[in-house]
């Protein structure tokens, strides 16, 4: 069965959350994804299974690392459904499709225009 470059389906079984409400696991995942030194990828297999992962470099002090680390799929899917992370361009091979995962910047609050007092007075005068 050939793979298509469709984005993985994400369903949030816990309901929608606002952008400000993150659980501890989602905050940890977002911290890892937002770190520019840690490239995170999602691999989508032909059967639809997704695996979010990153490379943990070897820590010379502890002797740990030097391996791929999987991130919790449910939390990553929740962040993707909420728009907190995005997927890059697909890289397809015969058995899977791989996407680069990036954190999105939180949108800035809209700027509130302060009307010119003289203009506001003219508008009120016309309306009266």
Image (cartoon, rainbow, N blue to C red):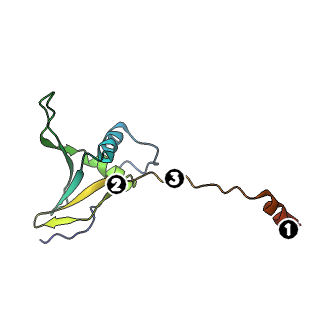
The answer to whether one can see residue 5 in this image is: yes
Q: What residue is disc 2 on?
A: 80
Residue 96 lies in what quarter of the image? bottom left
> How far separated are the C-alphas under marks 1 and 3?
34 Å
**Disc 2 versus disc 3: distance between alpha carbons?**
19 Å
**Residue 86 coordinates in the image, percent (x, y):** 33, 57
Residue 124: image location, x then y, percent: 84, 63
Q: Which label lies toward us, 1 or 3?
A: 3
Task: Give above or below for 38 relative to 101.
Answer: above
Q: Residue at x 23, y 65 (%)?
A: 90
Which residue is labeled 1 in the image? 127
Compare residues 14 and 94 and report the one nearer the observer.
Answer: 94
User: SS for tag 3?
Assistant: loop
In the displayed structure, does residue 110 sit left or right of residue 99? right
Question: Is 32 positioned to the left or the right of 118 in the image?
Answer: left
Total number of numbered discs in the rendering: 3
In this view, 54 is above or below 88: above
Left or right, 124 with respect to 55, comes to: right
Question: Which residue is located at x 66 percent, y 57 percent?
Answer: 113
Q: Which residue does the numbered mark 3 point to in the structure image?
A: 108
């Amino acid at each position: 069965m050939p793979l298509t470059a469709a984005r993985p389906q994400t369903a949030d079984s816990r309901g929608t959350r606002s952008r400000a409400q993150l659980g501890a696991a989602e905050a940890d995942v977002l911290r890892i994804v937002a770190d520019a030194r840690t490239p995170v990828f999602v691999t989508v297999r032909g059967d639809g299974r997704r695996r979010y992962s990153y490379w943990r470099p070897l820590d010379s002090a502890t002797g740990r690392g030097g391996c791929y680390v999987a991130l919790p799929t449910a939390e990553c899917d929740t962040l993707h459904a909420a728009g907190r992370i995005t997927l890059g361009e697909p890289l397809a091979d015969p058995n899977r499709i791989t996407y680069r995962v990036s954190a999105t910047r939180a949108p800035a609050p809209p700027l509130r225009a302060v009307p010119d007092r003289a203009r506001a007075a003219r508008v009120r005068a016309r309306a009266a």
